Amino acid sequence: MDLGVHLPLMEFGDEGQSLARLQATVDAARAGGFTTVSANDHFIFSTPWLDGPTALAAVLERSGQLTLATTISLVALRGPVPLAKTLVALDVLSGGRLIAGVGPGSSRRDYDAVGIPFDDRWNHFDEAVTVLRALLGRAPASRRTRLYPMPDEQLLPSPVRPGGIPLWIGSWGSPAGLRRVARLADGWLASAYNATPEQFATARKHLSAELTACDRPAYSFPNALVTMWTYVTEDRSERDHVLENVLAPLLNRDPEDLRDRLCIGPAAHCTELLSRYAQSGCQRVDLWPVGDSPRQLERFVTRVAPHIDGIYE
């Protein structure tokens, strides 16, 4: 299992948002041996949210050979043509290091912001992904579209790598979502705070069956666990503060539902949780430090990572 890092797109406390904060996070990821830097997508959130693709572009020069990933981009809301132009630009400027992760999104506010009915998100998403796959060079172009037009001319420049940009789809693990991943995606993105290691393992088995039904090889199909909120501390009151006063209100969740699912708390807890994910077949976990990313990543690298069963194997 490898480790990735989410860029700090939202504010915690009085950190504010700045290029320096993004750069410091990427520098810490490189120094700590992480493999991936990723950015998630929201238009409207309960706290100010920096645009994900723009943030990835801003750290290209600092990213070295790290893989870049969107985890996820809202293809139905951004539109497949504008999003394809953005993703291909990131791929070209990074020398072919991009993974395009997309999903429908779970926030009604994002849909309201662009005037698309939230209840119709799946129809929009399925067609948007089909168009995007063609634009990223992953599938033949189709002219049979209803909601999103297919351009008459090829979008240029083209992706750098042969075969186009890999397109992964996010799913919390529902049967319908996993069928969609098997049918349309090149990889699966699971959600850390919406799953347990045991649920991940079960969903992975279901995905393998769906891939087999689609005549696709399950053994080589990649996956990652994203949005693993992380705050390593041996101080119980500090742990409780992060869970109860920071994350739970931000995510509109019961802190007790989050307590055993996230890397919030002692190093031993984080080690045990991530070891279970490694044993369940998870190939990469993307950490999202809850404030002070460089310090938290350094603490994770020294106190947690060396003890995770299955890491870097």
Image (spheres, rainbow, N blue to C red):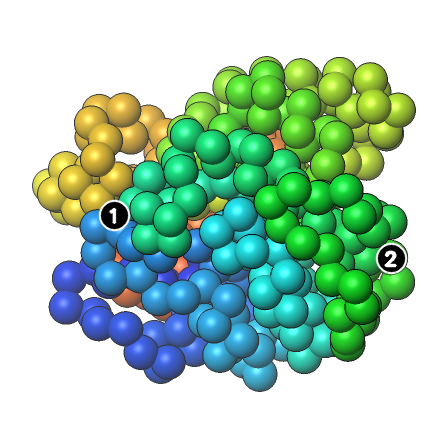
In the picture provided, is 248 more to the left or to the right than 209?
A: left
- Taking the spot 73% from the left edge, 36% from the top edge, the residue there is 184
Residue 230 seen in render: no
**Residue type, numbered disc 2:** Gly
**Residue type, numbered disc 1:** Thr
Residue 18 seen in render: yes
The front one of 171 and 75 is 75
Density class for disc 2 (Cα within 10 Å; few <14, some 14-19, many ≥20) is few
From the viewer's perspective, is the residue at label 1 or at label 2 nearer? 2
**Image height check: is 217 above or below 237?**
above
**Image height check: is 223 above or below 87?**
above
The front one of 95 and 50 is 50
Residue denoted by label 1: 233
In the picture provided, is 226 more to the left or to the right than 310?
A: left
- Which structural element holds mark 1? loop
In the picture provided, is 260 more to the left or to the right than 89?
A: left
Give me the C-alpha separation between circle 1 and circle 2.
44 Å
For the C terminus, the quadrant is: top right
- Expressed as whole percent of the image width and height from the top left, the position of residue 174 reads 54, 20
How many badges with numbers are in the image? 2
- Expressed as whole percent of the image width and height from the top left, the position of residue 255 reads 20, 30
The front one of 234 and 71 is 71
Residue 236 found in image quarter: top left
Residue denoted by label 2: 163
